[in-house]
Amino acid sequence: MHYVSQILPSLISGTGMTLSIFFWTLIISVPLGILVGLGMITRFKPLTWLINIYVWLMRGTPLLLQLIFVFYGLPIAGIVFDRYDAALFAFILNYTAYFAEIFRGGLQAIPVGQYESARVLRLTNWQTLRKIVIPQVVKIVLPSIGNEVINLVKDSSLVYVIGLGDLLRAGNVAMARDVTLVPMLLVGVIYLLLTAVCTLVLKRMEKHYSYWR
Amino acid sequence: MLELKGITKKFDGKTILDQVDLTVNDGQILTIVGPSGAGKTTLLRCISGLEMVDGGQFLLDGQPFDPATNRDNDAVIGVVFQDFQLFPNLTVLQNVVLAPTMVLKKSAADAEKEARALLERLNLGGKADLYPYELSGGQKQRVAIVRALAMHPKLLCYDEPTSALDPDLRREVEEIILKLKREGMTQIVVTHDIPFAESIADQMLRVEPKE
């Protein structure tokens, strides 16, 4: 117990980094994902073509590789990020692609008739999107988004590769120093707690949207 | 009065509507009948601006207008879709007041007052706060009619209003359409149900499939 209280502060500070990557990625990637998802269903072919290449790249290569590229690769082209910004940039690029795919599917699940009935009521495209399409899409995509949110909690551990001190790295340091698995056990428990909170919040949101079918 | 002059519509080079001429007088009911695939619904979609025409002209009260781009004046054409297309995420009342508040810029209070009166008139008084999934087919259809009426259309179009309903509800639709006619509404009804069409029509247009 004494040992646990000794290493806990460093684990908690690591958790801070994990949460910071998690929240910022989520807050920026979800709205971006909606925009890119909309871009995927426009009739402007060059745009959908471009987005498809982007999504293919992001989903087709490991996030770990993307992190390395952003931090070590981009400086060659003169674009230098510090460690934290590089991590955030890579995560946002990667998760936006996944969210965009999910939103595209949700958008395509809305019947054409909904757009047409909005059109004959003379609602503008923006009004239709805001009042009719997005609320329905959100309900449809919530379970899939939830999956990605849980993944994001755990994926954030990849930032160790560019030397950021997140939760997993804090555990790793303690394990190597003290030659014991206890820190890693604690790390596991903390991840479980974080994902449990996410699961709970997501369940709540799904329940909130169950007032209509 | 709505006039169509030489309306032509093609899909992939195939002519669906060939030089359609017709006139609907104010307060009258025009029914468009014909077998499936004859272009009834296409004609209705052209009139309501959901399809661009390839030729011909629309006149509303003698003034040329283009339903497909006609977005900002008040020459509104209301549409009741075959499957109603209510917005499932909004209550009955919200479905009805959405366009009047957002498009006609009515105050929420005025729009709600008018919506409630319209709902009352079509026997939907107690349904204002329900969601579409809680309604029967006939109720959904009446909400769709109220939603269209709330925009004060000059013309109300129905696509196959009896097809999604139980046979005994046919009379009910008939009564609603005739009631609106008595109140002066000009209506166009597309249907493959000839007896139904005959019982409501002032004028019938038969559309035949093109070879």
Image (cartoon, grey):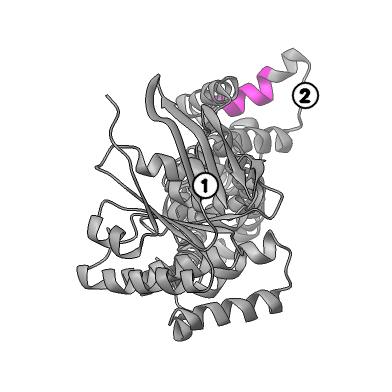
Circle 2 sits on which residue?
A80
| Main SS, magenta residues | helix
Judged from the image, the secondary structure of the residue bearing numbered disc 2 is loop
Where B41 falls versus A50 (above or below)? below
Residue ID at (21%, 68%): B167
Chain under numbered label 2:
A
Please tell me in which quadrant of the rendered image residue A192 appears: bottom left
The answer to which of A6 and A98 lies nearer the viewer is: A98
Circle 1 sits on which residue?
B48
Chain under numbered label 1:
B
Q: What is the three-letter code of the residue carrying label 1?
A: Ser
Quadrant of the rendering where the C terminus of chain A is positioned: bottom left
Q: Is residue A128 magenta?
A: no
Q: CA distance from mark 1 to mark 2?
A: 56 Å
Which residue is most to the top? A76
Q: What is the three-letter code of the residue carrying label 2?
A: Val
- Decide if residue B76 is in sight here: yes
Write the start and end of the magenta stretch as one range.
A65-73
Neighbor class of circle 2 (other Cα within 10 Å; few <14, some 14-19, many 20+) is: some
| Number of the label disc, if any, that sits on residue A4 | none
- Decide if residue A208 is in sight here: no
Neighbor class of circle 1 (other Cα within 10 Å; few <14, some 14-19, many 20+) is: many
